[in-house]
Structure formats: C-alpha cells, structure tokens
Image (cartoon, helix red, strand yellow):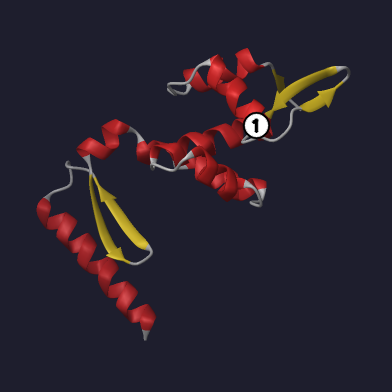
Amino acid sequence: MNTYTAKQLTALLQEEGEDINLRTVRYYTQIGILPPLELVGNKRVYTGKHIHYMRAILTLARTGESLASIQGKLLDLPLDAIEKIGAQRALYQPKHILENETHKIGEDVFITVSPRISAETKQKMLDSVSRILKEGER
C-alpha cells in the first residue's frame, strides 16, 4: 500500500494538473469530506483511497456542487463508484468545456463533441444515438 503525506498528496494532484494547495487538502481532511487518515505504524497517512476521493471531490466541485453536497453524495458510495467519478475529471477541464459542444440526447445521455468533428459526422452521430435510444424504449 502506497502512503502519502499531505504535502505528497498535494504534489501528486498538482502533477495531474489540479489547481490545489496543501491548505485545501488539510481543510478537506479536517471537515471530514475525506475519509479518516489511515494509521501505519505510529503515523497517520493518506493512501490511494484518499487520492480517489480527492479526484472525485475536485470533479464534483467543478460541476458546481457545494462541499456539503459532495460530502453527502460520497458518504455511502463504494470506492469503485468514487473512482469512476474521479475518472471523469477531464470532462470538466475548462479547456474542454469551452472548446467542445455537449448535446443532451436523452434524460441520461449526453454527448460531448470536439469541434474537429465535421458538422455532417456530428449530425450522423447524434441521429444514430437518438435512434438507438428510441429503439431501446420499445
């Protein structure tokens, strides 16, 4: 099991492109949005689980969720669900939001398309997904 200090955890997230500082990591730990630190020997440390939680927190924060709301949502989720949330961080990068187009196809289906996709290809893709969703409703 890899273990990290708060400083190492912050550095790891910064290497991934996150705009986060040590004070924020410590604050999230203090308010309990992160799980309690693990005891290894006589030291309390962060683990891979904490990295997944931080990624999920940062992803949800980008969607406009408050910290209290994020804490409530993550409270009873299994770790694999938290990992999935964190894996979606790239979708919420300001660069992607500004450059790409997102289309709502159905209540639970959104498609994000790069501007490099031709208008004709984009329309075919949207039509195909819409058709598949309609066929699934029958």
Residue 42 sits in quarter: top right
Residue 107 sits in quarter: bottom left
For this view, does 69 lie left or right of residue 53? left
Element at label 1: helix
Residue at image x 61%, y 36%? 33
68 up-or-down from 6: above or below: below
Horizontal and vertical percent for residue 54? 56, 32
The residue carrying pointer 1 sits among few (fewer than 14), some (14 to 19) or many (20 or more) residues within 10 Å by Cα, namely many
Kind of residue sitting beneath label 1: His
Observer-nearest of 35 and 15: 35
Please identify the residue farthest to the left as the structure is shown.
119
Residue at image x 54%, y 21%? 24
Residue at image x 69%, y 35%? 35
Residue at image x 38%, y 41%? 64
Q: Which residue is mark 1?
A: 50
> Looking at the figure, which quarter contains the N terminus?
top right
Horizontal and vertical percent for residue 92? 36, 38
Observer-nearest of 52 and 27: 27
The total number of labels drawn is: 1
54 up-or-down from 15: above or below: below
Horizontal and vertical percent for residue 84? 54, 46
Please identify the residue farthest to the bottom as the structure is shown.
138
Horizontal and vertical percent for residue 112? 28, 49
> Looking at the figure, which quarter contains the C terminus?
bottom left
